[in-house]
Image (spheres, rainbow, N blue to C red):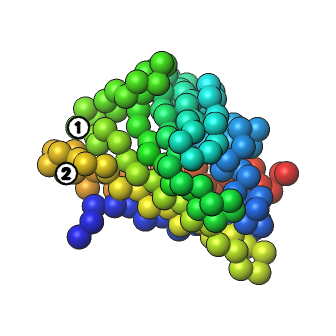
Amino acid sequence: MSNQVEISYRFNASRELVFKAFTESEHLQNWWGPKGWTFTIVKSDFRSGGVFHYNQKPADGDTMWVKFVYSEIISSEKIVYTSFFSDEKGDTVRAPFDKSWPMKTLNTVTFSEEEGQTTIKMIVTPVSPTEKENQTFEASKEMVHNGFTGTFHQLTEYLSKI
């Protein structure tokens, strides 16, 4: 059995609009990340081989840097990217919350529309994890699921305003 997290979420919006919200900085900055955290986009190059580099900061904690490297993009249908914690230069670093978190995760997001509603399906899988990283990911599946679900709630709120 594969060690992965699957999240499905339905939005009351067109597939094109939901895809834009996932891929355009002017939209992403309004909903991505944990609720109540500041979010700053440093680089957004949405194309295969492109990079999305940002930082996020809780009100009472340290700044966390994250970087995506996009490997596949099919407009309005699919986004595949590798995600990892980084420093401000974009170099890979260990997750600040758990030193045994996988160094990288592969994230696949698919978009489907039916009767004006869009369902996204997201699959998060560790990339080449050590046994310890695999155990940490396995033990954190609920946290990962809840984190993305909370972020998608914020997207629902944002979509209702635009």
Residue, disc 2: 135
Element marked by disc 1: loop
At 49% across and 19% down in the image, what residue appears? Answer: 88
- Toward the front, the furthest residue is 49
| Left/right of residue 93 with respect to residue 149 in the rendered view | left
At 34% across and 32% down in the image, what residue appears? Answer: 95
**Which quarter of the figure has residue 3?**
bottom left
Q: How crowded is mark 2: few (under 14 residues within 10 Å), some or many (20 or more)?
A: some
Name the residue type under label 2.
Answer: Gln
Location of residue 28 with respect to 146 vertically, above or below: above
Considering depth in this image, is 32 or 43 the residue closer to the camera?
43
Name the residue type under label 1.
Answer: Ser
Element marked by disc 2: helix
> Picture coordinates of residue 125 (x, y %)?
35, 56
> Picture coordinates of residue 35 (x, y %)?
59, 41
Q: Residue 100 got which mark? A: 1
> Picture coordinates of residue 85 (x, y %)?
41, 32
At 31% across and 38% down in the image, what residue appears? Answer: 103
Q: How many labels does the image show?
A: 2
| Mark 2 or mark 1, earlier in chain | 1
Task: Report the Cα–Cα distance between label 2 and label 1.
Answer: 9 Å
Q: How crowded is mark 1: few (under 14 residues within 10 Å), some or many (20 or more)?
A: some
Q: In which quarter of the image is the N terminus?
A: bottom left
Question: Does residue 156 appear in the picture of this structure?
Answer: no
> Picture coordinates of residue 153 (x, y %)?
63, 55
